[in-house]
Amino acid sequence: MINLENKNIILTGATGGIGETIVETLISQKANLIASGTNEKKLKELKNKHNKLIEIKQDISAHGELEQFIEKCSKQFGDKIDILINNAGVTKDNLTIRMSKDEWDKVININLTSTFLLSKYVIKKMLKKKFGKIINITSVVGHTGNIGQANYSASKGGITSMSKSLSLEYSKKNIMINCIAAGFIDTA
């Protein structure tokens, strides 16, 4: 495992099942961590458990607030963000012929558009330092599709393709962008 001690890391979706496990791993590796999510109670519980953790309640579907969110994180870290982990995501499953435009839009906006915007804003910070890593949590269904998940599959496939493009654009600037395509995980 790479040395994460004192690395400044932003994690979205910290209060979900995968997110909580990522928090535990990063804290055990002595990383400096900003954990964000929408569940304020769970964020407080994480903060109480890990006093080094900085918790910030942030709804990543509020696209107009995301640049300010990255600015706030940057200030917390003394203007040095090493790693962004885009973990936040949502499902609104339904068969395609029953899927509402709202169900489609919500999943695309949270999973794909928010990942794009957070990456965009953090890359601007990383370019100044000539270093950074972005890890996007995707899903195997972004490659395979899944019944009742046209919106989710499209969003996760989009994240994978976008990550490849971002990697081509910024790897020469020492900013590495990768994905983890998780399979089905036993979480709440």
Image: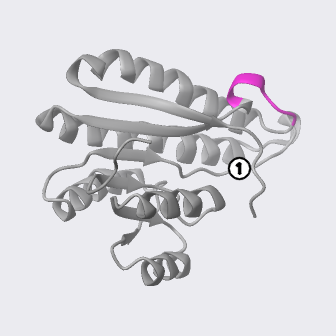
Q: Does residue 14 appear to the left or right of 169 in the view shown? A: right
Residue beneath the point at 46% across and 29% down: 178
Q: Is residue 157 above or below residue 110?
A: above
Q: Which residues are magenta?
A: 142-147
Q: Is residue 46 above or below residue 135?
A: below
Q: Indicate the quadrant where residue 104 lies.
A: top right
Residue 89 placed where, x, y %? 59, 50
Queried whether the magenta region covers residue 145, the answer comes back as: yes
Residue 34 placed where, x, y %? 35, 63
- Tell me the quadrant of the picture where the C terminus can be found: bottom right
Q: Indicate the quadrant where residue 176 lies.
A: top left
Q: Does residue 158 appear to the left or right of 163 in the view shown? A: right
Tell me if mark 1 has few (under 14), some (14-19) or many (20+) residues whose alpha carbon lies within 10 angstroms of its own.
some
Q: Secondary structure at mark 1?
A: loop
At label 1, which amino acid type do we have? Thr
The chosen color scheme is: one colour
Q: Is residue 50 above or below residue 119?
A: below
Queried whether the magenta region covers residue 160, the answer comes back as: no
Residue beneath the point at 54% across and 31% down: 159
Residue in the foreground of this view, choosing between 24 and 101: 24
Residue beneath the point at 62% across and 56% down: 18
Q: Does residue 176 appear to the left or right of 17 in the view shown? A: left
Residue 71 placed where, x, y %? 21, 55
Residue 112 placed where, x, y %? 53, 38
Location of mark 1 (residue): 91
